[in-house]
Each structure stands twice: as structure tokens, then as C-alpha cells.
Image: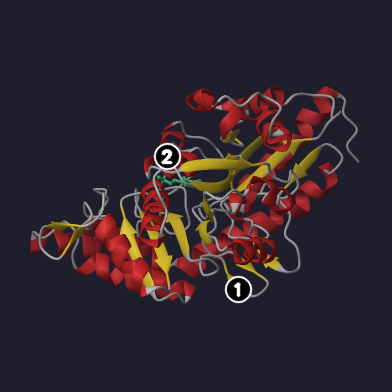
Amino acid sequence: MNNGQESQKANYKVPFGTVSLTPMARELINQALDTKWLTKGKYVREFEEKFAALFGVKHGVAVSSGTDADALACAVLYDFGANRGDEVIVPALSFIATGNAVFQAGLTPVFVDIDRETLNIDPEKIEAKITSRTRAIMPVHLMGKPADMDAIRRIARKHGLKIIEDAAEAHGAEYRGEKIGAMGDMACFSLYAAHIVTTIEGGMILTSSDAIAEALRSLRNHGMVGKFTFERIGFSAKMNELEAAVGLGNIEIFDDILSKRRRNMSYLIEKFRRFNKVFITLKEEPFEKLGPHAFSIIVREGAGFTKDEFVAFLEVNSVDSRNLFYSMPTQCPSYAFLGYQLGAFPEAEYCSDHGTHIGIHQDIGVEQLDHVVAVVEQFLKNKGVAYL
Ligand SMILES: Cc1ncc(COP(=O)(O)O)c(C=O)c1O
């Protein structure tokens, strides 16, 4: 995931990620350098306020990565009665950071399979995984597609659980008229280079709760409260002024970035309709707006070719791609110690074995998207696959 810049280096015709470094950001970086106060300061505060305002949420707490955002949000649960080792429900399919962050906070991720069509946690399967030690549900809005928040809120309310949105990939998404990032107790964003608002590396947590915001500010700075009193086991996860300057520049052009990405996403959704027999791709329902992160493509059962063959053809034709993540508990060797058997999360495993995703960011134009479509058509023709 974290290699958008590597793909730039490789000079792909359709690269995966990009960073918009605006003139305003360059100016602010120079001003910050002149002040010689480069750790957390006034630009970080301004960035937090402006980011939170974009989502209509009271507090923004800037941190050094999206993974830290997830981990700190989990660590806040100790302020609400959680004990070490307590459980957080997460989807089996996500970028590995989602699961890692739960462990980093000293808690236990409990995995739930996803829905292949939406890529998001299957709410029907959540309640079976709730125990007396469950403290929170952490839905991920994968590829910028909102998780089923009505169902998740219903379950969380019924069982007295907190909701931590992993909105790393969903800047600008909306669900039934509400903004993703403003729908749970906390929402965590990655500001890594591939995302809509970026600070190059960075993260942000949004919350409307004063108590949670205070705990998060302490947690990002070693658990410190006041001057050198340490009340929590904390992290060292502050954002610096130069990163905040890049972020402020991105907020200035947020609407522009979002509309270009939305244009690209809608264009590919439309163009890929003709391949519907062989691929499952991102969809947007009337009740939602996606915050387009990337375009997922999953090879359907019986399509007549493998994901690896397809991805290899994209690569030789200069279209950069990434695997559609993994079922964390069954396909990541780092989680083997949990003892899950392959087959336990069939939908997540299917997406990983048969899925990929490609860039649709603001620096990709329609001509590049037409190239993608032509490459896909050529591939299917070479394979003798009748897709219409
Ligand atoms: C769903 C998800 N969660 C968390 C993260 C972690 O973000 P970061 O790479 O900024 O640590 C990412 C990374 O993009 C992600 O895709």
C-alpha cells in the first residue's frame, strides 16, 4: 500500500498514488522553517481545526500516521473501562494496519468476514463475534465505500460498544446524507501520500467528545497530561509543522481533488459495466457517495483467467496496481500465531486471491483511464473471453 511514490519512480502511464504540493503549502513550509519551531505548533493546530471543520466534527487530533490514528483511538478505550487484551471487532479484509493498530494498543482484534460486493464488514456476522470482552467495532470504509453504518450503529447501541471508523481511505465519503468520519465515537484517517488529503505521512482522529479529544492529545504525547505527568501508556505520535503545512495546502484544494477523483471513479464504473460478467468492481448506490481512494477489480468465479495473469498484463502495459489486501487472520504470516485456518474468512480470502486495485487519483486524466479500458479489452480478447 505505502508505495505510491515508488510507482511514480517507475514511471507508470497510470500510477497508483500522487501528492498535490500546492503553492500555499510551499509558502507555509518556508514560513515554518523560518520560525525554527518545527514540531507540533500553530500549523498543526490550524490543520486540526480546518480538517475537523470539513467533516463538521468538533475536534481533530493530528498524529504521525493513519496506523497511529487507529492505535490511539483503540487506546482511548482504556479511559472507558477496557482492560488489556479486550476485544475490538474488525473486518477480516483491510490493509494490515487496521489489525496491527489494535494489537499495538494492547487489545485483541476479533475478525469478521466481509461482503464481496461492498468489500466491507458483513454486519450479519458481527453479533456472533461479540463477547463480554468486546469494547468497540472498527468498521473500515474500504476503497472509500461506506460500511453499512445503520446496521453497525444498531449493533453498537444494543451492546454498548464504541464505534471507531477506520476512514483512512474514505475522505469525502457520505452515507445517507451523513459524512463518513462523523458517524462514530471516533474516526481515523490516514494522510499518507495516496489519500485525498495528504501530509505525505500523517494521520488524524476526529471526535465530537471533549473527553476523548483530551485523552487522544495525551496519548499522542507519551500519555502526558500538563507538564511531565504521565497518566496513560502513551505513544510518540505527534505531527510536525511541515507535514501540517502540506495538509493545509491540500485542504485548500479538497473539493477540487475530490471532484476529479469522483469524475475518474464514475468514468471507470461506467466503462467497466461492459465487463460485469467477468469482474466485480466498485459500485456507488443512490444512498451513498464514495470518497474515491482507488478502483477495485475482482475476477469473478469462472471468468476463465486468473488474477495473476490479469495483473501481469496490467503491469506490462504500464498500469500500476496493488493487491486487494488480505484476510489478515488467514493470509498474513504475521498473524499465524492466532491459529486461524485458511477458509475461515472465505469472502475476504476470495477478494485477496482474485482482487486488485488501481489508481483513480486527481493527477490521472480521462486519456489514462481510456488506456486502462483498452488494456482490459485487449487482455480479454487475448484470453478469448466473451464479456458482453
Ligand atoms: C484502511 C487503512 N487503515 C489504516 C491505514 C494506515 O495508514 P498509514 O499508512 O498512514 O499508517 C491505511 C493505509 O493507507 C489503510 O488503508
Number of other residues with Cα within 10 Å of mark 1, as a class: few under 14, some 14 to 19, many 20 or more: few
User: Percent position (x, y) of residue 181?
Assistant: 51, 65
Residue indicated by mark 1: 178
Residue indicated by mark 2: 103
Tag count in the figure?
2
Would you identify the image quadrant in which residue 176 lies?
bottom right
Question: Could you say whether the residue bearing mark 2 is in a helix, strand or loop?
Answer: helix
Q: Residue at x 65, y 55 (%)?
A: 265
User: Disc 1 beta carbon < 8 A from ligand 1?
Assistant: no
Q: Nearer the viewer, mark 2 or mark 1?
A: 2
User: Percent position (x, y) of residue 3?
Assistant: 44, 36
Q: Nearer the viewer, residue 49 or 155?
A: 155
Compared to 3, does 272 lie above or below?
A: below
User: Percent position (x, y) of residue 336?
Assistant: 53, 23
Residue 198 visible from this viewpoint: no
Which amino acid does the dot numbered 2 rest on?
Phe
Say whether marks 2 and 1 touch (CB < 8 Å).
no
Q: Nearer the viewer, residue 24 or 229?
A: 229
Identify the mark nearer the N-term, 2 or 1: 2
Which amino acid does the dot numbered 1 rest on?
Glu
Question: Could you say whether the residue bearing mark 1 is in a helix, strand or loop?
Answer: strand
Q: Nearer the viewer, residue 83 or 60?
A: 83
Q: Residue furthest front?
A: 132
Q: Residue at x 77, y 54 (%)?
A: 270
Task: Indicate the quadrant containing the C terminus: top left, top right, bottom left or bottom right.
Answer: top right
14 on left or right of 296: left
Q: Residue at x 87, y 40 (%)?
A: 277
